[in-house]
Image: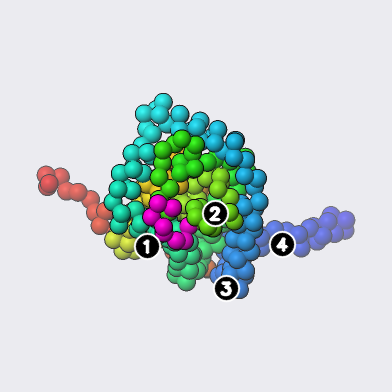
């Protein structure tokens, strides 16, 4: 009958909707070839777009002055003091230069590999957080070109890569001409490092590994300020982008990324959100 025909016609579409819904709520095991291709293409597009943004020097300098004046008005403009103080300790600032140039990529890739191997059920959602965060950052680079402290006119900051002749940074030295010097807001060093830190904290089992996870973005904040590559307000921008990334993944997968099953098809598996010893009740009358 007509009513039955209508129901039958809807059935395939309903089946597709159910399948998509189930895949979003319980993502399957990621495919290695697809993930490698996705990461490679995404980073290529990221670099292409980031460096294609017009380097509007005058506007970038004006924005830097706005942020510097705003921080001074709040009494929190600590970048100059940190930069000059750390620069006076050669071994420390040289180490920070290499930290800035290398760990940004090494740690992020390492966490992605760890997720893929140890938490395949959470990989897709957690990777989505990172990708959305980075995509929003590209919008920020385009809409708000910003000169980093080391490039501020009359800012008085030390460009530590140039001063100490270290290698690896695309932000200073001979490689600077192939990188957008004014893509500083938001800071993806903070966005990516905080993503790494939270992922390690919520999913690792060992207490000391969790502690290292939380220490990593904190150390990165010190490094980006000490090397004069960012204002600390750039870090705030990176945190906001990451927050949007987490919310976006929550809307896509209907659950927070770290709450998905560790292994696909195991809905009862849940992450340990704090070390188990923290959950022990404190008995009354004991110190």
User: Residue 153, percent across and down?
Assistant: 49, 36
> Crowding at label 2, few (<14), some or many (≥20) Cα neighbours within 10 Å?
few
Q: Name which of mark 1 and mark 2 comes first in the sequence.
A: 2
**In this orientation, does residue 102 appear?**
yes
108 w.r.t. 56: above or below: below
CB within 8 Å, label 4 to label 3: no
CB within 8 Å, label 1 to label 2: no
Q: Nearer the viewer, residue 218 or 78?
A: 78
Question: Which residue is painted at 55% across and 62% down in the image?
Answer: 124
- Residue position marked by numbered label 3 in the rendering: 32
Which label number is shown at residue 16?
Answer: 4
Q: Secondary structure at mark 2?
A: helix
Q: Secondary structure at mark 1?
A: loop
- Residue position marked by numbered label 1 in the rendering: 204
> Crowding at label 4, few (<14), some or many (≥20) Cα neighbours within 10 Å?
few
User: Residue 181, percent across and down?
Assistant: 55, 48
């Amino acid at each position: 009958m007509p009513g039955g025909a209508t129901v039958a016609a809807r059935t395939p579409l309903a089946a597709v909707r159910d399948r998509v819904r189930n895949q979003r709520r319980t993502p399957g095991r990621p495919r290695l070839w697809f993930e490698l291709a996705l990461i490679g293409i995404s980073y290529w597009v990221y670099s292409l777009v980031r460096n294609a943004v017009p380097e509007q020097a005058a506007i970038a300098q004006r924005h830097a002055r706005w942020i510097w004046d705003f921080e001074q008005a709040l009494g929190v403009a600590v970048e100059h003091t940190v930069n000059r103080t750390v620069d006076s300790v050669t071994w420390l600032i040289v180490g920070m230069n290499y930290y800035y140039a290398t760990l940004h990529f090494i740690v992020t890739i390492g966490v992605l590999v760890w997720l893929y191997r140890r938490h395949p059920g959470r990989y897709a959602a957690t990777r989505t957080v990172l990708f959305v965060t980075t995509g929003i950052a590209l919008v920020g680079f385009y809409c708000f070109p910003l000169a980093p402290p080391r490039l501020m006119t009359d800012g008085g900051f030390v460009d530590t890569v140039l001063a100490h002749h270290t290698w690896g940074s695309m932000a200073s030295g001979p490689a600077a001409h192939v990188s957008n010097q004014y893509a500083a807001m938001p800071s993806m060093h903070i966005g990516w490092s905080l993503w790494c830190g939270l992922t390690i904290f919520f999913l690792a089992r060992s207490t000391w590994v969790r502690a290292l996870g939380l220490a990593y973005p904190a150390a990165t904040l010190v490094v980006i300020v000490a090397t004069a590559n960012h204002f600390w307000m750039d870090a705030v921008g990176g945190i906001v982008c990451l927050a949007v990334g987490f919310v976006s993944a929550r809307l896509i997968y209907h659950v927070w990324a770290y709450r998905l099953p560790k292994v696909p098809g195991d809905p009862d598996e849940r992450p340990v959100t704090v070390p188990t010893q923290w959950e022990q009740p404190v008995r009354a009358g004991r110190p």
